Amino acid sequence: MNTPQVYIQPRISADDSIGNLLLQAGKIRITDVQNILSLQNNESLRFGEAAVKLGLVSEEDISRMLADQFDYTYLVPGEGGFSPELVCAYRPFTQPAEKIRILRNQLISRWFGNGKKTLSILGAGSGVGTSYITANLAVAFAQLGQRTLLIDANLHSPRQHQIFNLDNRAGLASMLAGRADMSSIVKIQSLSELSVLPAGAMPPNPAELISRGMRSKLMSELGQHYDVILIDTPAFAEHAESASLAIISEGSILVAGQDRTKYHDLEQIRDTLNGTNAQLIGTVFNQA
């Protein structure tokens, strides 16, 4: 299902100072401004810091106003109805979100900055956080202004429809079977540059659907509409189509989980992809 757009406050003048934004949002009144300015001058504080110190607004209010100043979209807990796992959407100023942004920037400099568009996120096994990494990476790219598509290609135990609160009756499986078209892609209105293609109903033959359906024609068509395409995949060690997705994609990164992934699993993935067209460009060690 679509979620409504979320804006902090429509601007009514060219003045986008914190004070004016707080006034527009109804967080402070005109009569509060003089008290804030007085404390600001007396204690050499920023306007927002003074407003917080007087108890007129919260730190969260100031963060939202700063985000509006710099055209940076994020949500307060509960907005959009998404999973709290979306740290880049709900808690963008925390360390987990910062680590996702570091990964995003590395991918831009080493991969997407070279004209590539498609990346599969491979999980060394189940429970290593592949869907979490993929979803937050997608949000982080969208926050950067990149037209981003997240494809849930885990046709065994899909999670992206749960993370983004979407209807999963139609999706990738239906599209690959020829029973749905691009209308199955859902634009996430509250994160305006992000679109998600959920997995859809689980088919009896996911490996065959992926192998014969997600070929160059489909990926080329999607590439005409998006700057970044991220593909969430099933556990590599458990399902054959993960290797197919690695080959079909322009490149892949591998997610390994702390205390979950064995060195033997990584060797097996390396050996499986050796001699194929798959390009493994890096590994993410997930400590969550």
Image (spheres, rainbow, N blue to C red):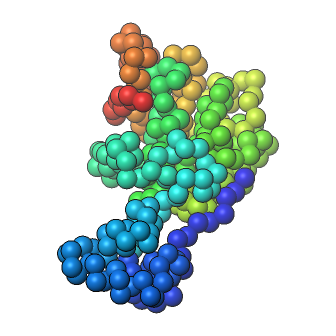
Q: Position of residue 72 (x, y in %)?
A: 43, 65
34, 59: nearer the viewer:
34
Residue 66 seen in render: no
Vertical order, 282 against 138 (above or below): above
Residue 8 seen in render: yes
Question: Residue, x 39% and y 81% (percent of image)?
Answer: 19
Question: Residue, x 66% and y 63% (percent of image)?
Answer: 4
Image quarter of residue 61: bottom left
21, 182: nearer the viewer:
21
Vertical order, 76 against 97 (above or below): below
Image mark count: 0
176, 42: nearer the viewer:
42
Q: Position of residue 79 (x, y in %)?
A: 60, 57
Q: Position of residue 46 (x, y in %)?
A: 27, 74
Q: Position of residue 271 (x, y in %)?
A: 39, 14
Work out which residue is located at the far top of the displayed protein and give it.
264
Question: Residue, x 49% and y 19% (percent of image)?
Answer: 125
Q: Quadrant of the C terminus?
A: top left
Direction from residue 283 to residue 89 in the image, left or right: right
Direction from residue 24 to residue 111 in the image, left or right: left
Question: Residue, x 28% and y 49% (percent of image)?
Answer: 109
Vertical order, 52 against 243 (above or below): below
Image quarter of residue 55: bottom left
